[in-house]
């Protein structure tokens, strides 16, 4: 084993002074795909810095689970978050030590027993949003789904009137913030350039910070009787001291607003985009929803009785994972992939590249929800499936997000048939979260039918007999 990072092989095409930055900035997906073809661990140059790209699922699981004590949140992705919202980066980006304090405070808000109550609010919100549509209307799906997830976040986790107004303000600034974050992750010096995009980013950052400060001051002064996530962030000990400082609370709110609004909205938009491009699957999901729900609003228990919809969501997350690039930093000298990695080394990995690895997933660019059908999915595929991370830092809100996505789609597809608009072509918008830019769909009302399931479709379990849909989502801890 080597004792120095420089023994890790360099990815080819490294330029003097710039390293691999031009290729990474020009085509981030292609860059990480190319890195994956050069071995499980490769070294890259990021200007004056050196880092490693990890391309092997076994090494990733070691970093995230069994060897997590040696690997902490850090690197370019985390640094961009901390510069944006201050503090220690919120639950998604804070160091492990801060995470051990903050996560138990927030965990009650995401306990499985709370999800059915949230689901009722999710269904109400979805019904209200799609109820505003008119027959033949052309809908900007990404924008509508962002409105919906914003409403769900405020109705469920930040419920006082001041917080609702502040989160609504954040929704309008979210596209600028998301694209600006990615630029600062790839090229930190970009943020110092005198560009209009940087001015818009700084203005959006200032507005959001000011709004969150108002949220915190208002709730500290008037705690009220709110049983929401915000109340848990502001909890005081028996001696009256706060568990989290205002700066730490601000970071956590930033984290939940990006995670609770942007990622779920993108999942919903991509799912609809894939369904309209694959009419066979659209019909299967629509028939399943009609058969199981029979026109009724979906309860949380009903969601487990929609296995085809669950597989569609699983496959959508495989193709378009919310946090598609992740970074870590070593806190001690450690071993990885046959090399000794020194303390302070930056490590990057692309969840998107991993989930499209042709050695793991056959025909990886094809939309095939049945790859997740029970009996079709291999252990290797399940272990490589990490759209929400793994281990103690696995996303705290994964069950919340999946319930919101499934219940929203059930409500929407019960009421409306969505079809692509001629001449309207959605394009991939690359940011910290991947969105289908320009996805416009025409909606026409429909009356749900109750067809008999065909022999090729999944049997519908009776109420109270719901089981696994065969999808690989892990339950447990994370963020």
Image: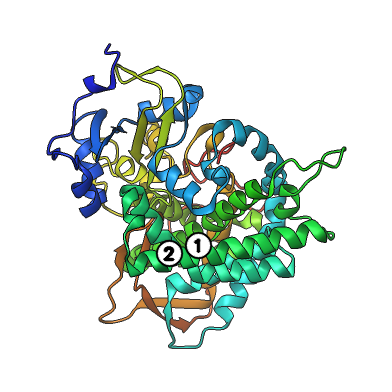
The colour scheme of the drawn protein is rainbow
Task: Give above or below for 337 relative to 60.
Answer: above
- Please tell me whether mark 2 sits on a helix, a strand or a loop: helix
How many other residues sit within 10 Å of disc 1, few (<14), some (14-19) or many (≥20)? Answer: many
Residue at the image position 42 percent from the left and 55 percent from the top: 312
In the image, 224 versus 478, the foreground residue is 224
In the image, 51 versus 317, the foreground residue is 51
What separation in Å lies between label 1 and label 2 (alpha carbons)?
6 Å
Q: Are marks 1 and 2 in contact (CB under 8 Å)?
A: yes
Q: Position of residue 109 (x, y in %)?
A: 70, 48
Count numbered badges in the picture: 2
Hey, which residue is sitting farthest right in the picture? 238
Residue at the image position 59 percent from the left and 70 percent from the top: 168
Q: Is residue 12 visible?
A: yes
Q: Position of residue 85 (x, y in %)?
A: 53, 53
Hey, which residue is sitting farthest top in the picture? 1
How many other residues sit within 10 Å of disc 2, few (<14), some (14-19) or many (≥20)? Answer: many
Residue at the image position 40 percent from the left and 38 percent from the top: 75
Answer left or right for 358 relative to 167: left
Mark drawn on residue 201: 2
Q: Position of residue 338 (x, y in %)?
A: 29, 16
For the N terminus, which image quadrant?
top left
Task: Give above or below for 318 relative to 127.
Answer: above
- Please tell me whether mark 1 sits on a helix, a strand or a loop: helix
> Which residue is the site of mark 1?
205
């Amino acid at each position: 084993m080597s004792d120095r990072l420089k023994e890790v092989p360099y990815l080819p095409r490294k330029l003097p002074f710039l390293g691999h930055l031009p290729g990474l900035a020009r085509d981030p997906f292609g860059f990480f795909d190319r890195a994956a073809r050069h071995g499980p661990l490769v070294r890259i140059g990021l200007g004056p810095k050196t880092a490693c790209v990890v391309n092997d699922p076994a090494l990733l699981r070691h970093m995230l689970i069994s060897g997590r004590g040696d690997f902490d949140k850090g690197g370019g992705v985390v640094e961009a978050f901390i510069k944006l919202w201050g503090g220690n980066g919120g639950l998604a980006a804070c160091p492990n030590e801060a995470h051990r304090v903050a996560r138990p405070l927030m965990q009650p808000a995401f306990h499985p027993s709370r999800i059915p109550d949230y689901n009722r609010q999710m269904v109400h919100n979805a019904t209200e949003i799609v109820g505003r549509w008119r027959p033949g209307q052309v809908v900007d799906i990404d924008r509508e789904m962002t409105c919906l997830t914003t409403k769900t976040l405020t109705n469920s986790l930040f419920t006082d009137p001041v917080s609702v107004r502040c989160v609504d303000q954040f929704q309008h600034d979210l596209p600028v913030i998301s694209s600006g974050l990615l630029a600062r992750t790839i090229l930190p010096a970009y943020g110092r350039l005198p560009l209009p995009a940087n001015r818009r980013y700084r203005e959006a950052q200032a507005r959001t910070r000011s709004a969150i400060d108002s949220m915190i001051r208002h709730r500290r002064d008037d705690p009220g009787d709110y049983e929401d996530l915000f109340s848990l962030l502001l909890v005081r000990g028996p001696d009256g001291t706060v568990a989290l400082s205002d700066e730490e609370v601000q970071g956590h709110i930033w984290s939940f607003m990006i995670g609770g609004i942007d990622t779920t909205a993108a999942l919903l938009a991509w799912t609809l985009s894939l369904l309209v491009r694959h009419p066979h699957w659209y019909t299967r999901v629509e028939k399943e929803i009609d058969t199981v729900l029979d026109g009724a609003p979906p309860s949380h228990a009903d969601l487990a009785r929609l296995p085809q919809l669950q597989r569609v969501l699983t496959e959508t997350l495989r193709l378009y994972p919310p946090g598609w690039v992740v970074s870590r930093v070593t806190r001690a000298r450690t071993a990885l992939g046959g090399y000794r990695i020194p303390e302070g080394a930056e490590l990057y990995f692309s969840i998107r590249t991993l989930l499209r690895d042709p050695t793991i997933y056959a025909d990886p660019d094809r939309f095939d929800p049945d790859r997740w059908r029970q009996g079709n999915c291999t252990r290797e595929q399940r272990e490589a499936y990490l759209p929400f991370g793994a281990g103690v830092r696995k996303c705290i809100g994964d069950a919340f997000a999946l319930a919101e996505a499934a219940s929203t789609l059930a409500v929407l597809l019960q009421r409306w048939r969505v079809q692509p608009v001629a001449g309207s072509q959605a394009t991939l918008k690359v940011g910290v979260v991947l969105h289908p830019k320009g996805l416009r769909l025409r909606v026409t009302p429909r009356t749900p039918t109750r067809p008999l399931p065909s022999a090729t479709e999944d049997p519908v379990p009776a109420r109270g007999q719901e089981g696994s849909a065969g999808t690989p989502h892990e339950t447990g801890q994370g963020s």
